[in-house]
Amino acid sequence: MGGGMLGHATATAFAAGTVARVAGLFVTFEGIDRSGKTTQARMLCEALGNQALAVREPGGTAVGERVRDLLKEPHVEIAPHAEALLFAAARSELCRQVIRPALEQGRVVISDRFLDSSLAYQGEARGLGVEEVFEMNRWATDGLLPDLTIYLAIDPHAAAARAGGGDRIEGEGLALQERVAQAYERLAAADAGRWRRIDADRPAEEIHAEVLAAVDAARAGAPAA
Ligand SMILES: Nc1ncnc2c1ncn2[C@@H]1O[C@H](COP(=O)(O)OP(=O)(O)O)[C@@H](O)[C@H]1O
Ligand SMILES: [Mg+2]
């Protein structure tokens, strides 16, 4: 299958509201800061071994890593529109250069954040509009959607009490995290077929076991929920 055909097929699937499936499995982790995304992505990657490919957002390409540095620079002020476009630019490169090729090889691609982070942070919490940010990202990614999105649900106070550093986005405090958490809840509820909501205020091994079960179900073609 050529890249053009794939793009058309996934765009069509997207328009029809179905999961864009190519050969592999595309799993994303979402949740507020310190919900455990990086921890769980790493555990899943280790459990799956060679068949897995881990990526992080923004990043994973030459452009993406520089966008990452720019967005995390505390003294660079970026307006919400430009911030959303930068995330999408990094995502576009990651999709074309890394994610799609790996899926075509039949691998399980595990991404620490993806599209839904933009919907929750820029679309909802920063007020750009979920639909607008969604459309812009659809264009940027040729309509690629995850097969399975794990939402690590945790109270912002509990997450804040966990150890961890503080870049600019994390430094904005609990109010933003509350808005983002509410946005994730709405997104997950609106598409239960793709999302799997997991209570993340538990030992990491317990969460990991549920993540593995959800991945197995998704690979078997069963609904994620
Ligand atoms: N289930 C868990 N229970 C308690 N602490 C956790 C759990 N998962 C991760 N942590 C710790 O919480 C902090 C944030 O986890 P991390 O995986 O980096 O979250 P995120 O990537 O979502 O910001 C880290 O110090 C990590 O070791
Ligand atoms: Mg992380």
Image: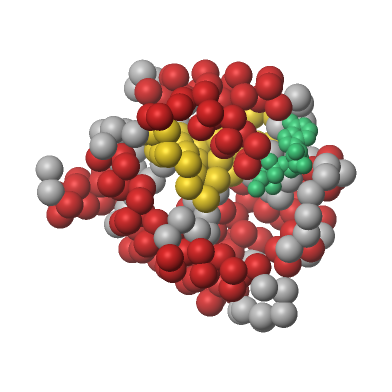
**Front in this rendered view, residue 44 or 170:** 44
- Quarter that holds the N terminus: top left
Q: Residue at x 59, y 73 (%)?
A: 70
Write down the quadrant of residue 139 in the picture.
bottom left
Compared across the picture, whether 204 is left or right of 7 comes to right
Q: How many marks?
A: 0
**Front in this rendered view, residue 63 or 203:** 63
Compared across the picture, whether 81 is left or right of 179 comes to left
Q: Position of residue 210 (x, y in %)?
A: 59, 21
Q: Residue at x 63, y 50 (%)?
A: 183
Q: Residue at x 28, y 46 (%)?
A: 101
Q: Position of residue 5 (x, y in %)?
A: 14, 49
Residue 213 visible to an observer of this rendering: yes
Residue 175 visible to an observer of this rendering: no
Above or below 223: residue 19:
below
Above or below 86: residue 95:
above
| Residue at the outermost front position | 50
**Front in this rendered view, residue 181 or 168:** 168
Above or below 221: residue 39:
below
**Front in this rendered view, residue 100 or 183:** 100
Compared across the picture, whether 206 is left or right of 80 comes to right
Q: Position of residue 29 (x, y in %)?
A: 56, 40
Q: Residue at x 52, y 18 (%)?
A: 213
Write down the quadrant of residue 73 in the picture.
bottom right
Above or below 156: residue 213:
above
Compared across the picture, whether 208 is left or right of 106 comes to right
Protein image colouring = secondary structure
Q: Position of residue 47 (x, y in %)?
A: 52, 24
